[in-house]
Image: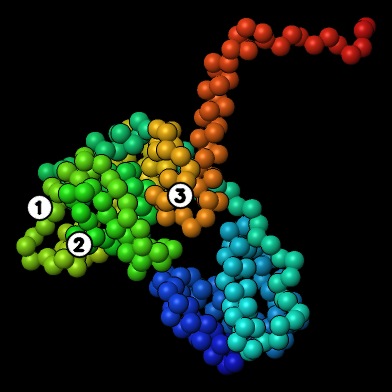
Amino acid sequence: MNDAAKQAFDLFLLTKAATGASPRTIKYYKSHVTPFLKRYPGAWDNPITMRTAFLEWINSTDSPATFNHRLLTLRPFWQFCVEEQIQPPTPDPFKGVHQRVTPSKFRDIDAMKVKELLSLPDRKTWIGLRDYALILFTLDTATRPGEALQLTPTDFDLHSFTATIPATIAKTRRPRTIPFSASTAAALNDLMRQRPPQWKDSSPVFASVTGRRFGCDQWNKQLKRYCLRDGFTFKPYDLRHAACTLHLRAGMNGETLQRLMGHSTPAMTQRYIHLTNDDLKKAQALTSPVELLAPRAKRAPRHVQ
């Protein structure tokens, strides 16, 4: 890697961390920018060589997601270098390059599958009690797995049925307070009563059996153990997606859902709204009074034989 590029990238990461970027975000930048700088050390020399190398790099993948990841990490780094006067402001190496459309990552999950999942954890064990409470909490609040798994007892108010997502663990780096139901509060209360007295308040609520943080990968593996009768298994984000669609189908409006989910813009929330709009279209087609009372007449052929 070019020494000057490495120094600039280290400064970029330090600045990101100082302005509130999470360790996960820092890792995200490293995982995409570092391989590029190593593969194309000459790209740092000027905007023209940067553009040539970048176009070759993004065109080497057929995955829209990978294409977008490369664009969304390298472009901010270059823009930072321009702002810091490390690189010239023109020409822009990324001019005319736009994100590619990626397929939806969420699955529309039937409510009965969720109900079956809730019957599977053995609540006579710590693991089963934790899993049951975590599923309920996610369904009620649509919290991201990475946020929920870091919550500690001090983040919960079981009397007011609310939890606070601190800025330090929120994906958007903005705190938010989210409500949950009395049933979820009861499950959380049962879980917290079973915490060993040796565990400190710093131990997450949804901890491992040793009181350590229970990671997203571990949660994913645990959910796979709860296999439904038809072979279906859940992923952590499936529960968040299910929560969104179930809230919408029960009557929640888009603005409220956006606040609940912690989306910084309505764009992502709209994807769930479109999904439930499909439900409305299907229901309307089945019960349409017009189709019942005045169905469309069969069209006459254009040409008479």
Residue at position x 64%, y 53% from top? 101
Q: How far apart are the two marked residues, 1 and 2, measured between alpha carbons? A: 14 Å
Residue at position x 56%, y 76% from top? 33
Quadrant occupied by the C terminus: top right
Count of all numbered marks drawn on residues in the image: 3
Mark 3 or mark 2, earlier in chain: 2
Q: Judge the density around disc 1: few (<14), some (14-19), many (≥20) Cα neighbours within 10 Å.
A: few
Residue 258 — which label? Answer: 3
Look at the numbered disc 2 and give the secondary structure of its residue.
helix
Describe the colour scheme in one phrase: rainbow
Residue type at numbered disc 1: Arg
Mark 1 or mark 2, earlier in chain: 2
Look at the numbered disc 3 and give the secondary structure of its residue.
helix
Q: Can residue 175 be spotted in the picture?
A: yes
- Find residue 282 and report its horizontal and vertical position in percent: 55, 25
Q: How far apart are the two marked residues, 3 and 1, measured between alpha carbons? A: 32 Å
Residue 193 — which label? Answer: 1
Query: Viewed as shown, does residue 274 lie left or right of 196?
Result: right
**Residue 6 against residue 72 in the figure, above or below:** below
Residue type at numbered disc 2: Thr
Q: Are marks 3 and 2 in contact (CB under 8 Å)?
A: no
Residue type at numbered disc 3: Gln
- Find residue 196 and report its horizontal and vertical position in percent: 8, 60
Q: How far apart are the two marked residues, 3 and 2, measured between alpha carbons? A: 25 Å
- Find residue 150 and report its horizontal and vertical position in percent: 28, 62
